[in-house]
Amino acid sequence: MGKKRLAGKNSCFYIICSIRLDHHRITGLSGYGPKFHPWYQRLPLGLYTLVEYFTKCIFPINLSYLYPFPFQNGDTVPWWMWLQVLFIPFIAWYLFLLKDRVVHFGVLFFIIHIALVLNITSLARHSVIADRYTYIAGIGICFLVVYGFQYLYSQRKKVALFAGTVYLVALIGYAHVYVHVWKNAYSVKERLKTTIESRADFEELKKIK
């Protein structure tokens, strides 16, 4: 029994050390540590990142190889991001009150696998999110989608079939349209260029060297 406890403590120690070393290595890259957003902006930025990962797992719209930050370091946090800070805790509390182990499993699976890349600490990159980080975490969201469809199917079969058909057709149609955007590197960069130039702070971004 003592050996098992010792092994468990050693495992936790190694995990904590690994996370700490990775964090030190990342924040030390290219001077990102001291240049990253101040601590009071990281909460809305982290929740924004969480919502982006969550929604793109269900509705993969406007995918890109680079996602610019919603605001630059030193700028004011957009007001709508503070709404997420207000409402997400209530959503989390509601999910907790459901006392549904399946829902808890899906949500926790997603959060645990995405927690380290929520921009709470600097990730030394110019993109607020990266789709590759959801390859494993997205399993939790897919689990919830299938569970939700199964529950709806057991209650209202026709509604579930209609909703599932609309969802699949929408995904297929959007994927077909998006093929032209991802045709080659030039088309992808042109789409990103258009997205950046449409930002309200584009003129300010051009001044950043």
Image (tube, grey):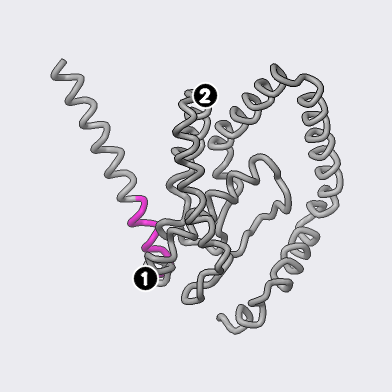
Image quadrant for the N terminus? top left
User: Would residue 156 appear left or right of 84 to someone viewing this image?
Assistant: right
Residue 144 in the image: above or below residue 60: above
Query: Label 1: few (<14), some or many (≥20) within 10 Å?
Result: few
Query: Label 2: few (<14), some or many (≥20) within 10 Å?
Result: few
**Callout 1 secondary element:** helix
Q: Which label's residue is closer to the chain start, 2 or 1? A: 1
Q: What residue lies at 82% left-to-right and 34% top-to-bottom?
A: 166
Tag shown at residue 102: 2
- Under mark 1, the amino acid is Pro
Tag shown at residue 105: none
Residue 107 in the image: above or below residue 49: above
Image quadrant for the C terminus? bottom right
Q: What residue lies at 58% left-to-right and 65% top-to-bottom?
A: 70
Residue 129 in the image: above or below residue 166: below
- Under mark 2, the amino acid is Val
Q: What residue lies at 27% left-to-right and 38% top-to-bottom?
A: 14
Tag shown at residue 34: 1
Q: What residue lies at 82% left-to-right and 40% top-to-bottom?
A: 170
**Callout 2 secondary element:** helix
Q: Name the one closer to the observer, 17 or 91.
A: 91
Q: Name the one closer to the observer, 84 or 73.
A: 84
* First to last magenta residue range: 22-31
Question: Is residue 23 in the magenta section?
Answer: yes
Question: Could you say where residue 131 lies in the image, as x and y percent from the top left?
Answer: 61, 47
User: Would residue 154 appear left or right of 208 to someone viewing this image?
Assistant: right
Residue 67 in the image: above or below residue 18: below
Question: Could you say where residue 186 lies in the image, as x and y percent from the top left?
Answer: 78, 61
Q: Name the one closer to the observer, 85 or 203.
A: 85
Contact between marks 2 and 1 (CB within 8 A): the answer is no
